[in-house]
């Protein structure tokens, strides 16, 4: 993969410092001014719907990427259609490589994620991380809905950073300082489309077999991969600690149970 532009790390560090106290609209405005090709990456949760709304007021050429993993709940597909109707954006729906999915499920079964954390990571890698990595080649920056308050793994999220995992492009998190209440305040104020599963007690929404509603007092992301207990609630889009250098570069995914290609 090659980056579309060569971004000096010190420029992005300075931008992160300058934008630390900026509101999300200002961070997005800087992003669209600074970079030629920008992708908002969304899993159709409230935060990125807010970003799509803000960006579509700033630019007439907003590109949005979402991942159809093959295991999404129907409600997510319904919301994708609603976003398409509501916003004038270019929507790219990524799908995993059928050959990689076939190899993985052939070897480990369709529900391999329940068998071990390593196989759960393999599934997320094949269905999410790899398609996104392929799609981000050629973009200068991607925008995420990450917030520091979502999980301990996200509490140090910078507003802007150089993303070495994706070829050195910029990774922008305009909502880094926002709370869940801030997000929902914007959703209500602008009557934005919202995922139907929020009304059924979900507070973070991913693939159907890997997400449940949360209970009062639980962390926002406690319903993701709930059977893994207190393990980090990350799928690899924002960190991929299990990926070996060889696996990352050759297409092989190495797990405790062997190698999936
Ligand atoms: S969330 Fe579950 S089904 Fe979706 S890619 Fe990850 S392990 Fe696979």
Image (cartoon, rainbow, N blue to C red):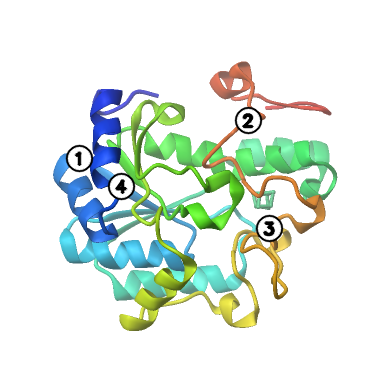
State the residue position of label 2: 241
- Vertical arrangement, residue 199 with respect to residue 89, above or below: below
State the residue position of label 1: 35
Inter-mark Cα distance, 1 to 4 = 19 Å
Inter-mark Cα distance, 2 to 3 = 18 Å
State the residue position of label 4: 20
Dividing the picture into quadrants, the one containing residue 25 is bottom left
How many badges with numbers are in the image? 4
Q: Position of residue 176 (x, y in %)?
A: 41, 53
Inter-mark Cα distance, 3 to 1 = 33 Å
Inter-mark Cα distance, 1 to 2 = 28 Å
Residue plotted at (41% across, 69% down) = 183
- Vertical arrangement, residue 233 with respect to residue 137, above or below: below
Tag 2 secondary structure: loop
Q: Quadrant of the N terminus?
A: top left
Residue plotted at (52% across, 47% down) = 155
Dividing the picture into quadrants, the one containing residue 200 is bottom right
Contact (Cβ within 8 Å) of mark 1 with mark 4: no
State the residue position of label 3: 224
Left or right placement of residue 81 versus residue 124 in this view: left
Is the residue marked 3 within 8 Å of ligand 1, measured from its CB? yes
For marks 2 and 4 on the same chain, the one whose residue lies earlier in the sequence? 4
- Is residue 7 visible in the rendered image? The answer is no
Q: Position of residue 32 (x, y in %)?
A: 19, 48
Q: Quadrant of the C terminus?
A: top right
Bin the neighbour count of mark 2 within 10 Å (Cα to Cα): few under 14, some 14-19, many 20 and up. few
For marks 4 and 3 on the same chain, the one whose residue lies earlier in the sequence? 4
For marks 2 and 3 on the same chain, the one whose residue lies earlier in the sequence? 3
Is the residue marked 4 within 8 Å of ligand 1, measured from its CB? no
Dividing the picture into quadrants, the one containing residue 219 is bottom right
Bin the neighbour count of mark 4 within 10 Å (Cα to Cα): few under 14, some 14-19, many 20 and up. some
Left or right placement of residue 117 versus residue 172 in this view: right
């Amino acid at each position: 993969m090659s980056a579309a532009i060569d971004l000096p790390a010190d420029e992005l560090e300075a931008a992160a410092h300058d934008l630390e106290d900026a509101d999300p609209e200002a961070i997005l405005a800087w992003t669209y001014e600074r970079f030629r090709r920008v992708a908002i990456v969304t899993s159709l949760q409230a935060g990125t719907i807010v970003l799509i709304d803000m960006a579509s007021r700033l630019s007439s050429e907003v590109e949005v990427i979402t991942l159809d993993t093959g295991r999404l709940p129907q409600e997510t597909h319904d919301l994708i259609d609603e976003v398409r109707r509501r916003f004038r954006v270019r929507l790219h729906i990524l799908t995993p490589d059928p050959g990689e999915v076939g190899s993985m499920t052939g070897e480990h079964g369709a529900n391999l994620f329940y068998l071990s954390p390593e196989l759960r990571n393999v599934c997320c890698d094949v269905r999410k991380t790899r398609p996104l990595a392929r799609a981000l080649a050629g973009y200068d920056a991607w925008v995420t809905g990450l917030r520091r308050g979502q999980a301990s793994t996200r509490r140090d999220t910078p507003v802007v950073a150089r993303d070495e995992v994706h070829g050195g492009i910029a990774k922008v998190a305009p909502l880094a300082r926002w709370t869940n209440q801030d997000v929902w305040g914007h959703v209500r104020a602008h009557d934005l489309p919202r995922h139907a599963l929020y009304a059924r007690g979900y507070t973070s929404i991913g693939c159907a077999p890997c997400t449940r509603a949360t209970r009062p007092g639980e962390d926002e992301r406690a319903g993701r991969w709930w059977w893994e207990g207190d393990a980090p609630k990350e799928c690899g889009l924002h960190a991929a600690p299990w990926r070996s250098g060889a696996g990352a570069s050759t297409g092989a995914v190495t797990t405790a149970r062997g190698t999936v290609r």
